Amino acid sequence: MAIYVNQETKVVVSGLTGREGRFHALRNRAYGTQVVAGVTPGKGGQEVEGIPVFNSVREAVDETGANTSLVFVPPPFAADACLEAADAGVDLVVCITEGIPARDEAEVYAYLQQTGVEMIGPNCPGVISPGKCNIGIMPVEICKEGSIGLVSRSGTLTYQVVHELTQHGLGQSTCVGIGGDPVIGQYHIDVLRKFEDDPETTAVVMIGEIGGDEEERAAEFIKTMTKPVVGYVAGFEAPAGKKMGHAGAIISGSKGTAAAKAEALEAAGAKVGRNPTEVGQLMANLVQG
Amino acid sequence: MDLLEYQGKQLLGSVGVPTPAGEAAETSDEAEAAATRIGCPVAVKAQVQVGGRGKAGGIKVAQTPAQARAAAEAIIGMDIKGHHVHRVWLEPAADIASEYYASFTLDRSAKKYLGMVSAEGGVEIETVAAESPEKIALVHIDPLLGLRNFHVRRLLFGGGIPKEQHKPMANVLTKLYQAFVELDAELVEVNPLVVTASGEIVALDAKVSLDDNAEYRHKETFTAFHEIFATDPQEKIAKEKGLNYVKLQGNVGIIGNGAGLVMSTLDVVAQAGGKAANFLDVGGGANAELMANALELVSGDPQVKSIFVNIFGGITRGELVAQGIVDALKSVDIRQPIVVRLDGTNAEEGRRILADNPNENLHSSPTMLDAANMAVQLGA
C-alpha cells in the first residue's frame, strides 16, 4: 500500500495532446503507471501512442474507468479542468499547472470540499510511489523503493532530498509534492495523516518553506504522531514582503518566517536539518541507528 | 503587485467606491499647479508601497498652493522605510467626522475570503487587533457563495458601525467586495474609510494588492501600473528576460533551478559565512540560452563577487545543463569566478563536460555544501 496512488490507479490526463502533457504522460506510462485516457476538447477520437483521447473527462471516466486526473492544461483553463475532473467522479486530481490565479484556486478548493475529491497541487511536481506508480513530473531515476514518506511544497528541493535519502540507501514509500501556491488541495498535515496510517511508511520527511502557517499546523499534528519526522524549512535568508519564486512563498509582516516554522517543528519533536544533506544524515541516523 | 495609494483609489473608484478626486505630481511645480486646480486646503501624500508614511512625515496638509509646493519639495525624494518617494498625490483635505476600517483578503489558513470591518479606523489594524480584538468583525466568505447580505450585517454590527451608517456602508462594502473579486486582488483595504462632516462616506486611503498570476485577465491594468514602478535595474532586466529574480544585499550571485532549491541555496551560502546577492530561479528547462541570460544578469550586478550555480538535474539532464553553461560562457563575458554544482540525473556526465572545457573562471564541486563554501571563499 502507498498513499494517494498505487498499482490500481488509472489516470486520465487533461492536456494529453499538449507538449508537456504528452511528454510526461508517456514517461509516467513507461514507469508502469496505468495511463488510460486523455482529454482535449475537440480532439475526441484521436490517440496518443495508443492512449485514447476524449472530449470530456466524464466520457473518459465512463469509457476507461479512470479514477485519477492529471492536469497539464495552461493556467487560464486549469481550474476548469480540475472542476471537470471532480465533477466526473475521480477520487484524486493531480494538478501540475503553475500560475493559476488564487481566486480560481480558492473556488476549486471550496468545490472539492463539497465533493470529497482530493487534489494534489496546483503548481506541484506530482506524486510518486517508487516501483508502483508515478503521476506528474518527478524524475524516477533518483527514487528507490522503501519506507520513508516525503511531503514537500517544492519540486527540485524534493528531488535533492530524495537523492540524499537514496544515497544513504533509504528508499521511499511515497513522495508527495503538494505545491507552492497559497491555496492548494492537500496540505502538509493532510499528507502526514496519511503517512501515519500507512503501514508501509516507517518515518517521514517534511519539507516546508516560508509563507503561510501550514508548517505550524502540521507541527501540531506531529506531536501526536507515532512515526518519527525529520523536517527541513527553506527560506531563512528571504526578505519580508518579496515572493521567492512560488506564489505562496512570501513573508507577510512578521508571519511565515522560516525560523518560526523550524522552531515549531522542533518543539513538536521533529528533528530539523539545516540543509538537505543534514536531512538525509538525520534520517539515516534515525532509521539505521 | 502592491499598488500605490492613488492607483488603488483609481481602481476602487472605477467600480463605484467613493474616492476623493485628486492628482499625482512628480515635481513641486506640478504639485503647486495641481493644488491650484483642486482648491485648498489639500492633502499632499507620499506615494510608497509601505505603511506608516504619516508618522514618517510623508503626509502634509497645505492651506495654499505655495504651501503645497513646499510640502511636495519636502516629501519627494524622502526615504520611507527604504522606499524612495518618487511622487505625491494631492486631494482635497477631508473634514473628518469618523474613521472606519474595511478590507477583503484571501485567508490562506481558512482557504476562504475574509472580510474585516471596524469602527476603529485611522490607526494600524494590527494595533487594534492586539489591543481590542473585540472591536473588529472578522467574517469568512465561501468563494462559491460570494458576499451575501448576512455577511454584510455581521460585518456592520460586529464592527460597531453606528446604525445610521449601515445603509451607505453596506453599499460601500458591496462595492469593495466586487472590486476584490473582479480585480483578482489579494487585498483591498481602506483605512481610514471616513464619514465626512457632511455625512458622506469616502475612501481616504487605499491599499490594493493584485494577484500576479491573474495578470493575463488584467493586461491593461498591469501594463499601466508596472511602468510606474522604478524597480532595481537588475530586477528590471530580469523582468524583460522573463527570469524569476529578487535582488538581495550580499555578494554571492545565485542561480538555481526551482524556487525551493534556490531558497535553500541562499540559506546554505549564509551557513557558509556568506550572503547571497540575489534569488534567481531558472525553472525547469535549464538550456543554454536560459543559462546565458541568467549568467549575464547576475554577473552584471556590480555587487556580485562570485557566482554559485546550483542545479539539480531531474528530468532536465545533467549533461545538457553542463553544455548549456559551457555554451553560455562562450557568449557572455564574465569577470567573476563561477562555482557550478551539478547533481542528480546524469550529473557525472555533466561534470565531465565541465572538466573537458576548462575555463579559469569555472570551478566545479559535486556537493551543495562544498560548492557553497567555495563560492563564499572566492567572493571574499
Image (cartoon, rainbow, N blue to C red):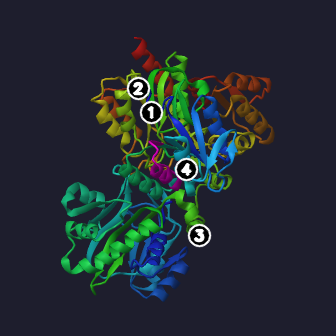
Q: Amino acid at mark 1?
A: Val
Residue at the spot of label 1: A151
Q: Amino acid at mark 4?
A: Glu
In this rendering, do the residues under marks 1 and 4 share a single chain? yes
| Distance from Cα at disc 1 to Cα at disc 4 | 33 Å
Image vertical order of residue B318 relative to residue A18, above or below: above
Stretch in magenta: A80-92
Q: Secondary structure at mark 4?
A: helix
Location of residue A99 in the rendering, given as x and y in whole percent from the top left corner: 55, 52
Of helix, strand and loop, which mostly describes the magenta segment? helix
**Image quadrant of residue B187?**
bottom left
Q: Sort mark 3 into few (<14), some (14-19) or many (20+) by Cα contacts within 10 Å.
A: few
Look at the image and say whether residue A82 sits in the magenta stretch: yes
Residues at badges 1 and 2 in contact (C-beta under 8 Å)? Answer: yes
Task: State which mark lies toward you, 4 or 3.
Answer: 4
Q: Secondary structure at mark 2?
A: strand
Q: Residue at x 46, y 49 (%)?
A: A86
Q: Amino acid at mark 3?
A: Glu
Judge by depth and name the residue closer to the eye, A277 or B233: A277
Q: Is residue A111 left or right of residue B300?
A: left
Q: Sort mark 1 into few (<14), some (14-19) or many (20+) by Cα contacts within 10 Å.
A: many
| Distance from Cα at disc 4 to Cα at disc 3 | 39 Å
Residue at the spot of label 4: A59
Q: Secondary structure at mark 3?
A: helix
Judge by depth and name the residue closer to the eye, B165 or A235: B165
Task: State which mark lies toward you, 1 or 4.
Answer: 4
Residue at the spot of label 3: B220
Residue at the spot of label 2: A204
